[in-house]
Image: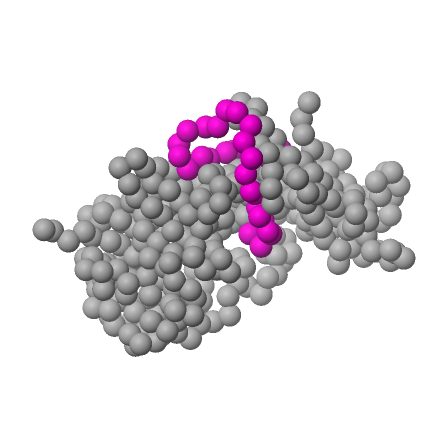
Amino acid sequence: MTKQKVAVAVSGGVDSSAAALLLKEAAYEVIGIHMRLWDSTGHEYQAHRAENICRILDIPYHQVDLQKEFESCVVDYFCREYQQGRTPNPCVACNRHVKFGFLLDKALSLGADYLATGHYARVEHSRDGHRLLKAADVRKDQSYFLYTLTQEKLGHVLFPLGKHSKDEVKQMAKQAGLPTATRSSQDICFISQKNYGTFLSQRFSSTTGDIVDTRGRKLGQHRGIAFYTIGQRHGLGLASGKPLYVIRIEPESNRIVLGHEEELYSRKLAAQKLNWISGKAQQEPITVTAKIRYKSKDAEAVLFFRNDSVDVHFAQPQKAITPGQAIVFYNMDEVLGGGIIDSDEIGA
């Protein structure tokens, strides 16, 4: 029987190297494939590590240049969303367009049956379809970032780390002689030291505008709506007896609206650009648990459907619902799908 061939997205980190190790031990024909996404000294370091990992595992090493695709689908999107007063999620965009788009296509063109990554999530394959599930290690679960996967793509995807804890992954890598030391991680891989402001300033010019309270009274001036996000408290340049937070960004009027913490909470939101893992759009209202950001807790909610959008009604108020961020829907451990938060208000 011919071995099934798997291309592993080897980043140079311990997770992807452990994924390749597990697949090789499971008797797959494994090849390593490294994405060049951003021109930096950090990438050269990661590429060197990725090639060394493939050498240790005795698997072929390939490098694919996806810089133009990454720039267009992730970086340009990232800047465009901030310009419009929204808070983007570049990891979701990267997974959708780059890793499980261009890279998956490249893996298949190399004759691979599957693309595997070091994500902490699970996928169950059956004749009836493919299910995306949370990782066994709930502390490391990354299913939130994968809700854009489709049945077609899931049929060619493996997540070898889904049943393992981070500690187990580090231990198996160490025992196999794979490098386990890592550089400090960054939230945004193409921005060093979390200096979003400087990066955005280099990409586009901003227009100053008014900072107002919920009654429209002017409190000060902002330096551009791109430099603010919902829930922000620090860096507002204002003194107040009671802490003030960004509760709304109004790109049409170029205003930042501040309020008190209790004004950050809402029970409802509207979401668009939906994807359902099953490939079948929902019609009738359903009860789910939902996450409005990666680190938020699952919250019970009811979904009401409107053509290509969904209204989400939470059982308990949620803090700092942020337009531009992903909302992901679950049934127990199964990812049902998700979308992009459009507003914390429900349309009429």
In the image: residue 129, left or right of residue 43 = left
Camera-side residue: 251 or 242? Answer: 242
Q: Residue 203, percent across and down?
A: 58, 50
155 on left or right of 224: left
- Residue 195 shown left or right of residue 160 in the figure: right
Question: What residue sits 37% from the left and 73% below the top?
Answer: 171
Which residue is farthest left? 1
Image: 98 above or below 253:
below
Colour pattern of the rendering: one colour
Q: Is residue 297 visible?
A: yes
Q: 312 or 33: which is nearer to us?
A: 312
Total numbered circles: 0
Residue 208 makes an appearance in the image: no
Q: Residue at x 32, y 61 (%)?
A: 19
In the image, which residues are magenta?
A: 269-298
- Quarter of the image for the C terminus: give it: top right
- Residue 304 in picture, x, y percent from top left: 58, 28
In the rendered image, the vertical position of residue 138 relative to residue 288, given as above or below: below
Relative to 280, residue 32 above or below? below
At a point 74% along the width and 46% down the height, the residue shown is 264
As for residue 270 lying within the magenta part, the answer is: yes
Q: Tell me which residue sits at (41%, 37%) in the image.
A: 277
Up the image or down, 286 lies above or below 222; here it is: above
Position of residue 185 measured from the top left corner of the image (x, y, whole percent):
50, 66
On the rendered structure, is 347 left or right of 182? right
Q: Quadrant of residue 39?
A: bottom left
Give percent across and percent down for residue 66: 37, 51
Q: Is residue 307 magenta?
A: no
